[in-house]
Amino acid sequence: MAYLDAQVAVVGAGPVGLLLACEVALHGVPVVVLERLPEIEWRPKAEGITGRAIDIMDRRGLMIGVTDALPRPPTEEERARVAEGERRPDSLLPKAFPGARHFATMFLLRPESPDLLVPQQLLEEDLARRAAELGVEVRRGHTVTGFVQDDDRVRIDVEGPDGPYRMEAHWLAGCDGGRSVVRKLSGIAFPGTDGVTTGYRAFAEIDDPGFHLPGWFRKDGGLLVYEEGPPRFITLEFDGPPANRDAPITLEEFQEALRRLSGTKVTVTEVKKITRFTDNARQAETYRSGRVLLVGDAAHVHSHWSGPGLRLGMGDALNVGWKLAAVARGWCHEDLLDTYTSERHPIGEQTLEIQRASIALMQPGPYVDALRRLLRELLLHDEANRQLTALVDDLHIRYDMGDPSLTGPLVGRYSPDLRLRHAGDTVRVAELQRTGRPLLLDLGAGPGLRALAEPWADRVDVVTAECAEAPAEALLIRPDGFVAWSTPADPASLRDALTRWFGRPGQEAGDE
């Protein structure tokens, strides 16, 4: 057999690419990551981690210490302040409490899961450390220029610091962003809608810090966000997408946007960090083409409001990582990878719809004003708030587990983070899943059920525990946290679920 650089090649060393590499490497599969940039990029990116992404970090033990200090829930006084502020027609508010969530700049008050306000780059650094611990080879300054695939492998052309070379892998995962080279070379179509806005996110110095009230404000031309100390700005104008997204961003163009929205002659004296963005919304028709997979922004792009990109991409990586490892190990047939598209494509499609709705609700004008006033009133009711928060935070997801007899309330849903009594200690489900392996949780089903799972002991963890509020006698939880099987289903059906998701016992191809 010809030399392989790795079983899996990942293109892109952002948080999604690094998380995917870690997920695959957790199962002993060699991974190489190719990243065109020589080091982590510190321009403004995601400034908060939200919803399901926080749960993902917890289940893999990422950023321990940061996740342990999540923002506290809002007090009743803070909730009342938000309710009062939302009723003001000119309000868009300074954030009323740490970690507050918003949809189209209208606050969501789900108290149990506020934002984790840390820059994306800190997560990248933590993932890079984890990847190194797992033996992942990250090649920075290496740009993919082409590839060809056959039934056996992918041959990848790379431009490295020392010149061009070719490497080979069984699988190629494109995690290289919205302008993905891997997607373009694969020929996968990327339909969608063009942007209608141009925005800037910047840390900058100005000549008059009192030029405008701090806070979030809807203006005749769009949106202006101004936060003091150090000065941070977001501008959004509904004047179409940027004429040239690749052109360098000048101080003058940002200054003009700031002047138009504020109605002042404020002068920008220094730009420290800045990025330009729009709201085009596109999605790959499929997330897999043969031995090539698209993950994260390579598979879908959309506006950034409410921080969906990082959350959605991390969900993609967690969904496909263990499946890719199972196929690479020879445990499962490659058809398992088709469930990546069938499960995640509808989630991406729904996210695009939610983001289009968010942009529509931020447009200026009396008709949108009326719609916002109506929605604000609805969002003051906890049930409506919870439902919208579940949608924007990916908390509503339920996958089809392929067996119509599995009708329990938990099957297909993200497993609750139960507190368990195990081996004399108190432990959470999230802590038991940090190995990245499937988990069969016996909460009272007995030794017969554990015996059914024994042939899969090389790839499935079986844990017997006590739980004061056990939702079932037994749960089979996939590595991505979703419940694949649960009592009261027939215990014999557990074998079918184990085989469907984790292969036949004892099967391993040694495909190295």
Image (cartoon, rainbow, N blue to C red):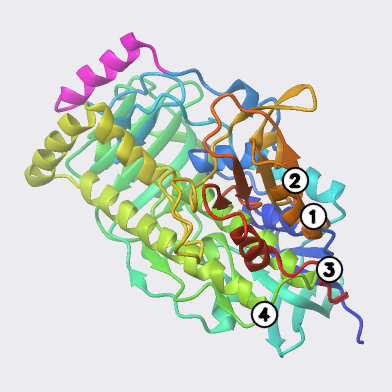
Residue nearer the viewer, 116 or 227: 116
Query: Which circle's residue, 4 or 2, is located before the other in the chain?
Result: 4
Frontmost of labels 4 and 3 is 3
Q: Position of residue 411 (x, y in %)?
A: 49, 51
Residue type beneath disc 4? Arg
Disc 3 to disc 2, C-alpha distance: 17 Å
Position of 97 relative to 267 (above/below) = above
Q: Can residue 130 be seen from the camera position used here?
A: yes
Q: Secondary structure at mark 3?
A: loop
Q: In the drawing, what numbered circle is on residue 462?
A: 2
Residue nearer the viewer, 415 or 18: 415
Say which residue label 3 marks: 506
Q: Is residue 75 magenta?
A: yes
Task: Give neighbour class at mark 2: few <14, some 14-19, many 20+ (Cα, 10 Å).
Answer: some
Q: Give the residues drawn in magenta, as a range.
A: 74-90
Disc 4 to disc 2, C-alpha distance: 32 Å
Q: Work out which quarter of the rendered image holds the C terminus and state it.
A: bottom right
Disc 1 to disc 4, C-alpha distance: 32 Å
Say which residue label 1 marks: 454
Q: Work out which quarter of the rendered image holds the N terminus and state it.
A: bottom right
Q: Are marks 4 and 3 in contact (CB under 8 Å)?
A: no
Residue type beneath disc 2? Val
Residue type beneath disc 3? Gly
Q: Position of residue 199 (x, y in %)?
A: 37, 49
Disc 4 to disc 3, C-alpha distance: 24 Å
Q: Secondary structure at mark 4?
A: loop
Q: Secondary structure at mark 2?
A: strand
